[in-house]
Image: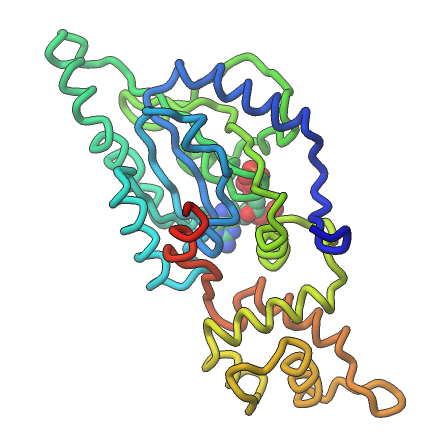
Amino acid sequence: MSEQTKPNINWYPGHMTKTRRKMEEDLPLVDAVCELLDARIPISSRNPDIDAICGAKPRMVILNRMDMADPAATRQWADYFRARGMAVLQTDCKSRRGIGDFAPAVRRLLAEKLERYAQKGQKGRALKLMVVGIPNVGKSTFINQIAGRKGAKAENRPGVTRGKQWVNVDQGLLLLDTPGILWPKFEDPEVGMRLAYTGAIKEEILDTETLACHLMELLWSRYPQAVRERYKLELSPDADGYTLLTEAGKKRGYLLARGEIDTERMAKTLLDEYRSCKLGRFTLESPEQMEKTNE
Ligand code: G4P
């Protein structure tokens, strides 16, 4: 990977070791792991080692920010994870959509365990869960919504220990108060870029214009109609990102003093409009890509 595209994410290797150790310490305390993903980028918002860390522990995937993702793509992702034996929940933590489905989904996932408890005469025994995910994916907001509180933001720094606290979610359902913070696959430059498109990482991993050129190309290949309409583009399907960005800037009338097109301004506009969903609700990754990643 070149220095230019190396994602400048503020984690050092010790971070990963500490968070992994912390999660491995907490795992025996819980009955299932609930992994939050950004529904717009389910591959890039995923921790590369999550399957190895969780082992045979029952799992739930929470496709969060469904309000910002392409609904058809979110359904495909839900099918993908369900086919791999995981429970799936789709949520919008801002409007609370999907939040009410959490408790029933957990009980379905852990039905056999509940049955065993009942047979042993432990009917009231609580199920225990933990939430994990990369920074900014919505863990604190999710926990607060599930618990029906406006609590403080959970600590994002790995390795900081607090006393273990459990949040009462529902009758017989307890959630570990502190979410497990995981790292993304930041050695992959594509992952770094997608995290930057969505604003998940604030650090500049590339200059704005280069980032916007890559995003433009990606959107042009995945959602050409919406991009064509919004920026009045009449270019060929294989047009490159810079040509697309320049043409969009021209159509917007973003001009510099000598009649040059202000591509820097257009780059900021594109990133803003993507992040605020003004362009549409776009998902940047599909399950077929995940299959390729796993090959
Ligand atoms: P973290 O604990 O995983 O680090 O993430 P956190 O809950 O702090 O959420 C990060 C940001 O994502 C917050 O926005 C939060 O409101 C937003 N968010 C979480 N879930 C959703 C969702 O389902 N849909 C949308 N649209 N946004 C979501 P923020 O900019 O930090 O604050 P604010 O906008 O809430 O003021």
**Above or below: residue 207 compared with residue 222:** above
User: Residue 276 vs residue 90: left or right?
Assistant: right
Where residue 173 appears, x then y in whole percent? 31, 23
Residue depicted at x 40% and y 64%: 70
**Above or below: residue 122 compared with residue 53:** above
- Identify the image quadrant of residue 56: top left
- Identify the image quadrant of residue 235: bottom right
Residue depicted at x 73% and y 53%: 2
Residue depicted at x 55% and y 24%: 20
**In terms of depth relative to the viewer, which is nearer, 174 or 9?**
9
Residue 128 visible here = yes
**In terms of depth relative to the viewer, which is nearer, 119 or 9?**
9
User: Residue 199 vs residue 176: left or right?
Assistant: right
Where residue 269 appears, x then y in whole percent? 67, 72
**Way the structure is coloured:** rainbow
**In terms of depth relative to the viewer, which is nearer, 254 or 212?**
212
Where residue 200 appears, x then y in whole percent? 60, 49
Q: Residue furthest left?
A: 119
**How many discs mark residues in the rendered view?**
0
Where residue 208 appears, x then y in whole percent? 73, 64
Residue 94 visible here = no
Q: Residue furthest right?
A: 258
**Above or below: residue 189 compared with residue 270:** above
**Above or below: residue 234 compared with residue 201:** below
Residue depicted at x 43% and y 48%: 64
